[in-house]
Structures are given as C-alpha cells and as structure tokens.
Amino acid sequence: MEPVDTIIQDFSNKEIFTKYKETIRGRDVFITQCFNSDPNKDLVETLILADAAFAASARRITLVLPTIYGSRQDRKSSPRTPITISTMAKLFKSVEADRVITVSLHSPQSAAGFYSAGLRFDNISSARLFLPLMEEMNKDKDFVIVAPDVGALGKASHYAEYLGCDIAFANKKREKANKSEITAFVGDVKDRNCFIVDDMIDTGGSLVNVANMLKEEGAKEINCLATHLILSKDAKQKLEVAPINKIFGSDSVHHEELPDKVEVVSLSELLSQVIYRIHKDKSVGACVEEITKR
Ligand code: R5P
C-alpha cells in the first residue's frame, strides 16, 4: 500500500489546510495520527483530514490513532467535568470515520463510547511486543510487577500472570491534572527487582513517585514499561535522575531525543499488519496472536 501524497499546512492565522494530491474516490483510506507535542492541533488536523476524505468520496475511512486525545478523561471525575474520550468518539463519527484503531487504550471500557457512536473500534494490546523482552529479563531478575495506581492493575496483573511474577500496587490520588501522590502501597518488594507497568508517562510524576517509594521499601533494580511516552514538560530530565534502570516504551509519540535509559519498541510492524488485515477483511485477532507467539 502506497501513502497518498498529501498537503498539510497552516494558513498564516494557524488555521489548517489539507489536500489529497491524488484521487481517493472509492478507496479504503487509513489516516494515521500521533497526538504529539500539540494534541489540540493534531485533533483538528485529524478531523479535517477525515472529513476531506469523505468529501473526496473515499469508500471507507479508518483513523489509526496509537494514542487517542482525552483517553484519560474517561469518566466524570467530579461534577461538571467532561468525558472527553466519548466526545472524541462523537467527533470522529461526525466526520464520517468508519473505524478507529488504537493501541493499549487507557481504559479498555472506553470502547463502549466508540461502539455507541456507531464506530468500529480495535484496541490492539502492545503487550505482545513487550512480553518477550520482559520474559527474557525475568529469567535472571525474578521481578515483582508493580501497578503504580489502581487503574493500571488490570494491565499489571496480565503481565504478572503471563510471566508468573508476584504483583504489588500503589493507590494514587490526583488532586489536579499533572499532580499526584501515593496514598497506600500493597506488596513486598524488599530486596526484589521490580517492573512497573503503566500505559503512559506524561509528566513522569506518577512514575517517579512510585519508583522513589519502591526504593524506600527496599527494592533493588527498578524497570518500567509504559506504552505511550508522552513526556511533557521536564519529564525527560526527571526520568534521567529517577532511580529507574530501564524504561521500555513505544514510538506512538515521536521524540527527537530520549534519555539513554529509554528503549523504544516500534509499533509499525504491528500496526501495518492490522491495517493490511482490515483492508483485506482478514482476522485481526489472528495477526495479533501470531505476533504474540514470536
Ligand atoms: C493515569 O492514570 C495514567 O495511567 C498514568 O499513570 C498517568 O497519566 C501518568 O501521568 P504523569 O506521568 O503525568 O504522572
């Protein structure tokens, strides 16, 4: 499948202009977008590209969004707050998208918002890329898998079960966006190697808090897996000095430079297989299972 030559540029007042430089009439269109350093702009760009594809008579429009804008805003966290992930589903439907593909969504149950908006939705787990790496390391290190908050417990137990590891977890309280504190910790990590599992690192606050706490509890080596490396503000500097040995993540968000301790595993092969299979009406589950076995 060849990429379509597309113009994306800003007018001088920063409005976005897009143009598909060749016909896409009757085609099966996949629009890929990473919500990078300017997610608000990336969102508008995605909406415009999808709507322009519809106007250009594309047969089917799939949005390939390894991370989705607002995925953490998945419930009314207090009165009069938005459920942004459900707003996204409505917006994507309004520009005539047919399907959304994402990777390791913050709350898998947010899929309901997409189905009820009338969109097909594939949430592809990145575990199949990271499990072999962790399995190899675990042979010598006998990890305790650590969930840094209750929300991460589902993912962490999946890893712990697959690897046959013990599990520990923290409870996190977030007073306001980007400011969190640990209120409780359950598990025995003294003199043990730990592997923290989370879906994303944004400011790095949650991860650094839990890593410091593990050290206080007597943990030995601390490693981490977080699929989406948002790394906003001074996160990179924080991670450099944190008591963490290695951080595994994906290229769902692009960075020119990363601290040496961060190891990036590319999602491209997984996503290209998923795209190909959707295009050919083949099983996506089967492709995901094949990758797991490798
Ligand atoms: C929250 O529930 C997420 O799973 C992450 O733990 C969180 O978003 C990370 O944010 P930060 O790095 O800013 O603490």
Image (spheres, rainbow, N blue to C red):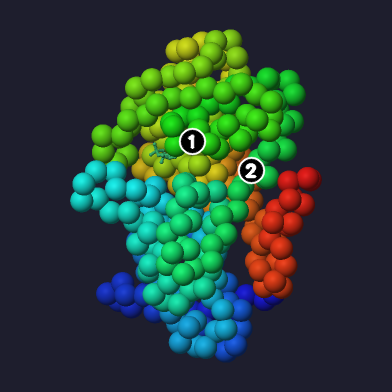
Of the pair 41 and 65, the residue shown nearer to us = 65
Q: Which residue is mark 2?
A: 127
Instruction: Write the residue at 64% across / 59% down.
Output: 271
In the rendered structure, which amino acid carries the disc numbered 2? Ala
Please give the name of the residue rendered at 39% of the width and 39% of the height, measured from the top-left corner. 203
Is any part of residue 260 visible from this angle?
A: no
Q: In the rendered image, which residue does mark 1 sit on? A: 152
Q: Quadrant of ligand 1?
A: top left
Alpha-carbon distance for marks 2 and 1? 13 Å
Quadrant placement of the N terminus = bottom right
Q: Where residue 190 appears, x then y in whole percent?
A: 55, 10
* Count of picture labels: 2
The crowd level at tag 1 (other Cα within 10 Å; few <14, some 14-19, many 20+) is many
Q: Is 24 drawn above or below residue 45 in the view shown?
A: below
Is the residue indicated by label 1 positioned so its CB lies within 8 Å of ligand 1?
Answer: yes
Which element type, helix, strand or loop, lies under badge 2? helix
Q: Residue 246 location, x and y as percent?
A: 59, 31
Q: Residue 6: where, in percent of width, then height?
A: 52, 79
Q: Is residue 282 above or below residue 220?
A: below
Front-lying residue, 67 or 7:
67
- The amino acid sitting under disc 1 is Ala
- Residue at 33%, 27% (x, y): give it: 181
**275 or 117, which is in the foreground?**
117
Ligand 1 within 8 Å of disc 2? The answer is: no
Q: Is residue 62 visible?
A: yes
> Quadrant location of the C terminus?
top right
Residue pictured at 42% horizontal, 59% vertical: 113
Q: Which numbered disc covers residue 15?
A: none
Q: Is residue 9 left or right of residue 259?
A: left
Task: Report which quarter residue 59 is drawn in.
Answer: bottom right
Foreground pick, 165 / 200: 165
